[in-house]
Amino acid sequence: MSDPVIRLSQVSKSYPGAGGLFTALSEVSFEIARGEFVAIVGQSGSGKSTLLNLLAGIDRPASGEVIVAGQALHSLSERALSAWRGRGIGIVFQFFQLLPTLTAAENVMLPMDLCKHGPAAERRGRALRLLERLGVADQADKFPAALSGGQQQRVAVARALANDPPILLADEPTGNLDSRNAKALLQVLAELVRDERLTVVMVTHERHAMQRAMRSIQLVDGRVVTAPAEALLHA
Amino acid sequence: MLDTRGLKLLRDLGQHRARSLLVVAAVAIGLIGAGAVLNTWALVQRATELGYRSSLPASATLSVNRIDAALLQQMRSMPELAAVRARLAVRAAVQSSGGWRNAMLYAVDGFADPGLGRLQPDSGSWPPRDGEWLIERSSLEFSGASVGEPALLKLGQGEAQPLALGGVVRDVSLAPGWMEHLVYGYATPATLARLGAPTAFNELQFRVRDAALDRAGVRRIAAAVKTVIERSGARVTAVDVPEPGQHIHAAQMDSLLMTQGAFGLLALLVCAFLVVNLITAMLAGQSREIGILKVLGAGPRQIMALYLSQALLLGVAASLIALPAAIAIGRQYAGFKADLLNFPIAGHAIPWWAIALQLLVGCLLPVAAAALPVRRACRISVGAALRDIGIVTSGQALASTRRWPVGGLSRPLLMAIGNAFRRRQRMALTLLALAAGGAVYLGAANLRSAVGASVDLLYADQRHDVSLRLAEPQQAAALEAAALAVDGIAAAEAWRGQRATRVQADGLDDGFTVLSLPPASAMLRPRLLDGRWLTGSDRTSLVVNSAWLKQHRELAVGSELALTMDGRRQTWRIVGSVDAGLQPLAYAARAALGGETLATSLVVRTGSRSASAQLDAIQRLRAALAEAGMPVASSQLQSEGRRIVEDHLLMVVDFLGAMAWVMIVVGGMGLASTMGMGVLERTREIGVLRAIGAPGRTIQLLVQAEGLVIVVLAWGLSLPLSAPMSLLLAEAFGRIMFPVPAQVMPSAANALGWLAIMLGVSLLACAWPARNASRISAARALSYE
């Protein structure tokens, strides 16, 4: 693969636990090209979220290399990681993680204010356009508590796109949605990949979500395996 | 226009309104306490400095038997002296509705522009005209006189004469008349002569040209002036050189305000504890949001700036509330203090630096309190922040609670006890705040007891009910016999007070009062500190009180000193020291001064203890003595004197203890917030309890029990802390008033009283959190995140 936008090389990660050291990831290596929609699948405890955290720079590998959008994340300082996160990636969480005291539009504007993305006077307009793109512009001035789960997740996606990141990471984005909203959200992600060549890496254990991705990376007990996804989902 | 960070800042404060208001209230309370004392100090300093300086106070006052124009002219030509004036000072009495009041009347050679000791006209006529008198402002109410109305005045045995009160003046060089129980008055020499006063001036006052001279330097000049006076043929009987540039009560006021200021700062510190707790709790609830901000690209500095700005905003709000209150209270208190010092305070503005300092402290206190918790919160990893699920108690911590010796207690109660220790830092800060308030409360209670005991001791020595000052010396035996013949008088003893002077190294006299009395006096039994009391054979022996020794540190029991009394110079020996009275005093055997037959005062014991019966007896006694040709100049009930002393002393104690209540209030607020935060953090736990059948009442009791654990621990901690606090307060009181033996441990009554207060604080502080906890529904709690 030429110029992968994400490259992991022999990445391992362990955590201290009550029963000793727990290995979450073991010598994981893979690459993802620009414009790919990749699903990272596996059972609970397989290391999916750990992997996503490493890609987001939220966590550091014990060994190996993590290179995302040209940045060797494993060697950046905490401050540099924060700055990189603001522009290098967008993250969508299972439980939306919107700030409760900001409206939908303000939540989308927040990353722009933090990273000083674009002129201040234009940020609200940009936020409204993103919300429009996600189909929730009419909810722009409502607080998250007044929005449905599906609406909140769309706002979260809009926020993740606020600073034009080349990569979108999504951790179980449909985990807290009903089937209708989940389907709609996956459609949005697919459209973003198609229309804007966004690279989307989505952690999921849901079949219908996995089926929307172009390909899957399967994790079993912290290792990448090559068995068919269907088989793993039924294991 | 605020960006999203500013909006989050404001809305977060609004969302946690109660907590935000609590921080504002805590800072405001602490700031009001400390700020009021600072404002008072600043105002009083400025008023006394400006007021005292502008009054051109006398550097020294010499009592001289003869002052003529030539002597005055000679004084005025001395280059070291900037101003000189002659004064006539006479003891008098003024009749008021309460009887005759002691008075000091002054006449000077030129009221209008003396160049020193300026009087400030307050109302009425100025300067005094012949045939009228002016009263010092602080004596007006005490005297019962009214401007424009005549008052009866008399000098010694002279006839009482009505004199119109022409006006009111302020003399800042004097302590307030009501405090000294003296009516200060001013009249022309001709007016005083009409009352029977001598025509010649009897005091010479001067002001030195060099304002930078210290007391020793002024004393050297006073010695030179004394030499000039004595060369002219006149005699100097006393020299008074006050501390230059300092009002007589200034040092006491400074000590009192400094001590109160220290407690104000302590109250502010206790408020800071509360603010740390509250901000830590606010941040605990923001863990996840901090994680989100980090994920969205916020750096540590941006996050710190956001939360420190919140703290700053709360500080600004607290300062804006506290500052006007601190200014208002400061002005009130300063007015009260100024009355004590007899200085005008109106028209003085609080200095800008005092206001700026209060604003700075108010704004920065929450920022300082928040700095460490914010820094800690910002350091939490993104992963941990996003995974935050409230209180997690480690297995080790839980296991350790099993070893506590609290067998026999129910499991829910054990749970309440354990809950109190789950957030140890928060609990420690709450404990410290409550314990600090308790230490000050108990310390003030101890001081009150110690002061009461000291006053008891002071008056226990004095076995008489009334003391009377005679208009002129009388035969002691006749005096006593005449007194004993009066109905209601159970015992009487004649004493003699005389002025003794001792020549010091700088050539000036050091004067003090020697009280001669029967060695086996039935009216005075002071507590012996060193040496022995007087005996019948003593002729040149002195016993001195501790206040006298404090003034003459170079002398001790066993020392000899040359004294001049009644024109006779003799060497005396100090044979003992006693704990008696607040003013410096020496005692000699009545026979030693050759005054076996002469007395200047009479002390009596009445048959009745009631004040009205005693007053009747005094009136009969005064009438009888006047009829016998032994008129009385003034009299005072011991009980009245004691009440005045106690009032003053206890006022100081109460001032010192007032800060304790500030700390108790803040401590209570801290407990309320700690319990509130605890309930919030354990919402899911409470839901589980509800789900398994715990009724609301039980939940309430658990919360209340947790609060009780904390206050009982705080009470226990405050007991040993009160010991050093008691020592501190006693030491401060000693500097302000007089030394008292420190009562270090609280009495059982005070300790139990404090426990009762703490229990009340706990019930009150935990009521709302307990109520909230009991209203949490199981379903809502279990879905809580």
Image (spheres, rainbow, N blue to C red):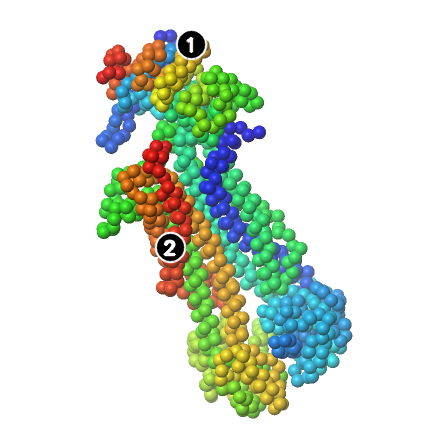
- Nearer to us in this view, B75 or B680: B680
Q: Read off the residue under disc 1.
A: A194
Q: Read off the residue under disc 2.
A: B759
What residue is shown at x 67% (from left), y 72% (from top)?
A: B145
Residue B102 image position (x, y, % from top left) = 62, 76
Residue A230 image position (x, y, % from top left) = 26, 12
Task: Tell me if A171 is positioned left or right of B336 in this view.
Answer: left
Labels 1, 2: one chain? no
**Image height check: is B3 above or below B642?**
above
Q: CA distance from mark 1 to mark 2?
A: 69 Å
What residue is shown at x 55% (from left), y 48% (from top)?
A: B322
What residue is shown at x 54% (from left), y 71% (from top)?
A: B644
Residue depth check, mark 1 versus mark 2: number of the one nearer the observer: 2
Under mark 1, the amino acid is Arg
Please give the chain letter of the residue carrying mark 1. Answer: A
Instruction: Give the class, few, some or many, for how many residues have Cα within 10 Å of label 2's Cα (few <14, many ≥20).
Output: some
Under mark 2, the amino acid is Leu
